[in-house]
Image (spheres, grey):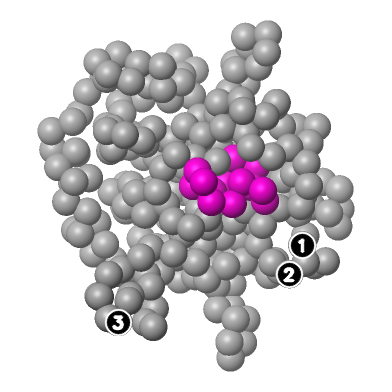
Amino acid sequence: MTFMKVPKFFVASCTTLALCLAIAHRSVAEDETASDDDAASSADGPKKMELVKLDAKAPLWVDKTNKRVVMIGKVCLREGQLEMFACPEGTKEHESVLSVPVLAERVHTALILLGADPGKPVQFTPEYRPASGPVIDVALYWTDESGKRCSAWAQDWVQDARTGKALSEPWVFGGSMFYVDEKTGKRDYLANHGELICVSNFSSAMLDLPVESSDKAGQLLFNAYTDHIPPANTKVTIVLRPRADKAH
């Protein structure tokens, strides 16, 4: 069993995504998936984003002009304890507020395409060291039951069990890691299995908190902030934006 940090040249291994940047640049209205594109492009109100679709089968875009990654997910949990804020669909919806039908490794690559250089995942031994890397702001946009367009920071949907207030820490791009099967040589990006945006520390997290936060039962620090979260299955546009020259 071999684990390896995701290399900085990871983007070079994602040929399909690189080709998308070269040939798939288009306006939102021109894309075949009009409903998802409309949701993505309306994230910033009247300011239209120039979106490049990175996956023909998944709602994932890059806006290189405004330095943003855009994806579409849905609310899967409104109450209870959390280990993740967002997970890839079909993984850890029982402990995540949002699920997204996008592989975490694709989101990782999208952030690199914007110039975000992944740092390091959390380290537990021989001593604890929190995840480090560029700070990634996570904004949320959705339409409520009355048709009103709404927005919030992702932290507003996470409640600190110690204070009763919204999460105050940012997320950092630690970048997860690969598991390499020694027999087959096959590489597996660990965050694909659930740890897309985490509130408990995991060495497999793509985005993690830069503070100590246990994943042990009875020691979880964060809950879904039920009063702030729209109904289950609400479609949510998730916008990731690296902060300029800001890293933990």
15 vs 135, nearest the viewer: 15
81 vs 129, nearest the viewer: 81
- Res 224 visible: yes
Residue 62, position in %: x, y?
A: 33, 37
How many neighbours does mark 1 have within 10 angstroms: few (below 14), some (14-19), or many (20 or more)? some
The correct choice, above or below, for 151 with respect to 117 in the image is: above
**Residue behind mark 1:** 220
Does the magenta portion include 194?
A: no
Q: Label 2 to label 3, Cα distance in Å? A: 30 Å
- Specify the quadrant that holds the N terminus: bottom left
Q: Label 1 to label 2, Cα distance in Å? A: 6 Å
Mark 1–mark 2 contact, CB under 8 Å? yes
* Secondary structure category for the residue under label 3: loop
Looking at the image, residue 201 sits to the left or right of residue 136; the answer is: right
Q: Residue at x 68, y 8 (%)?
A: 146
Amino acid under label 2?
A: Lys
Residue 217, quarter of the rendered image: bottom right
Q: Residue at x 35, y 60 (%)?
A: 117
**Residue behind mark 2:** 216
Q: Which mark is residue 50?
A: none
* Secondary structure category for the residue under label 2: loop
The correct choice, above or below, for 37 with respect to 206 in the image is: above
The correct choice, above or below, for 69 with respect to 231 in the image is: below
* Callout in the foreground (1, 3): 3
Q: Which mark is residue 182?
A: 3
